[in-house]
Amino acid sequence: MNALVLLDKDAKTELSEDLKARVVRTLEEKGYHVEAFDLGKNEAYPCLGCLLCLTKHPGECVSKDMVNEIRKNVKKYSATFFLTPVVFGHPSSTIANAMNRGTGCHDWQVIIGFGEDIDDEERSTFVDLVVKHRGEADIVHPGMDRKVEAFVTTSVDDNAAICQTVRSE
């Protein structure tokens, strides 16, 4: 089993580094071979909506960036973990670009938002947006992503609790 872990490197903090280390360790303990990438804004361009990846050259994006390279191997992953700062209740643009361009496997996606000053409303907005638009309410590709989970962490204790939940999956 293979797992992909993507982190927004432009928003690294001690909290995000602890989260990444714990997630990787937890997945390895579960028997996954983990590939982790730190993506920056210049490595995850937004989707242009050209549909050429679906029509003219299937699976190949016109944007030649790191996300395009990761997408080429996405079928080998059975789990994808997106680690993103929470920005006004949303994933960062870098991680959102990676998600929108199909870097996540369709079996199990976990999106974990991090930040030390996230309030309850921002937490709720993040979880609602992620779960609905990556799974339950995806009107473009209904049912494509089998299992989508969202978590928010504001401390290393939260990181430990999230990894305990992942460990029991």
Image (cartoon, grey):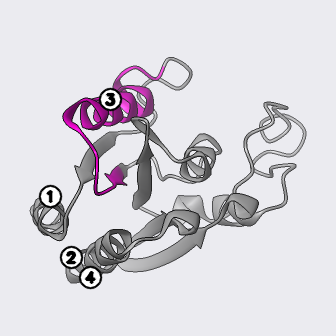
Quarter-wise, where is residue 89 in the image?
A: top left
User: Hey, what amino acid is under mark 4?
Assistant: Arg
Q: Which residues are magenta?
A: 110-138
Q: Which residue is mark 4?
A: 25
Mark 3 to mark 2 CA distance (whole Å) = 30 Å
- Where residue 137 sits in the image (x, y, percent)? 40, 20
Q: Is residue 142 toward the left or the right of residue 28 in the image?
A: right
Residue placed under numbered mark 1 in the picture: 169
Of tags 1 and 3, the one toward the viewer is: 3
Question: How many residues crowd mark 4 within 10 Å: few (<14), some (14–19), many (20+)?
Answer: some
- Residue 27, given in percent of the width and then of the height, sits at 27, 74
**Which residue bears the numbered disc 2?**
30
Picture residue at 44% right of the left edge, 55% below the top: 84
Tell us which disc is closer to us: 3 or 2: 3
Distance from Cα at disc 2 to Cα at disc 1: 9 Å
Q: Nearer the viewer, mark 4 or mark 1?
A: 4
On the image, which quarter does residue 38 sit in? bottom right
Amino acid type shown at disc 2: Lys
Instruction: Specify the quadrant that holds the C terminus.
Output: bottom left
159 sits to left or right of 110: left
What amino acid type is highlighted by mark number 3?
Thr
